[in-house]
Amino acid sequence: MALQGTLMGLSTHGMAGFDYQKAKKMLNIPNGYTVEMMIAAGIPGRSEDLPEELRARETPSQRKKLNEIIFEGNFNS
Ligand SMILES: Cc1cc2nc3c(=O)[nH]c(=O)nc-3n(C[C@H](O)[C@H](O)[C@H](O)COP(=O)(O)O)c2cc1C
């Protein structure tokens, strides 16, 4: 969904921190289905339009560099 959203010009944000039972009830999800996660999708806005405290959080997260976590071939090459 994140990849498809990106292709469609949307921002997506996966979440696990919500009330699963409440989501199931509010969305009328029938028995036989389980709620696994939530993804918010929306049209990206401009960070300039955010209140100062939220704008300050609009910085890249401190991810490890891809070459620290992704390897081509096997570990001996
Ligand atoms: C398993 C999992 C659960 C997450 N749950 C939440 C959540 O409940 N609320 C939230 O704001 N972000 C949550 N996130 C983080 C966002 O999805 C996050 O934006 C995403 O991992 C991309 O990372 P980034 O913020 O560094 O771009 C979760 C991420 C993962 C991997």
Image (cartoon, rainbow, N blue to C red):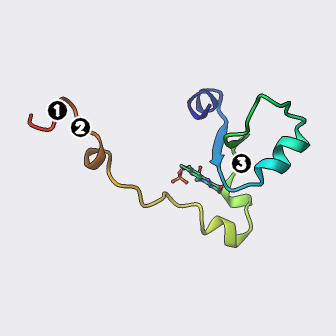
Residue 45's place in the image compared with 35, above or below, is: below
Name the mark on residue 71. Answer: 2
The quadrant of the image that shows the N terminus is top right
Mark 1 and mark 2: Cα distance apart in space: 7 Å
Q: Are marks 1 and 2 in contact (CB under 8 Å)?
A: yes
- Observer-side mark, 3 or 1, equals 1
Pointer 2 local density, CA inside 10 Å: few below 14, some 14–19, many at least 20: few
**Residue on which disc 3 sits:** 45
Residue 51's place in the image compared with 24, above or below, is: below
Pointer 1 local density, CA inside 10 Å: few below 14, some 14–19, many at least 20: few
Name the mark on residue 20. Answer: none
Q: Residue furthest left?
A: 76
Name the mark on residue 74. Answer: 1
Q: For residue 70, what is the image quadrant?
A: top left
Q: Closer to the N terminus: mark 2 or mark 3?
A: 3
Pointer 3 local density, CA inside 10 Å: few below 14, some 14–19, many at least 20: few
The quadrant of the image that shows the C terminus is top left
Give the residue displayed 69% in from the left and 52% down from the top.
46
- How many numbered tags mark residues here? 3
Say which amino acid is labelled 1: Asn
Nearer to us in this view, 46 or 40: 40
Helix, strand or loop at disc 2? loop
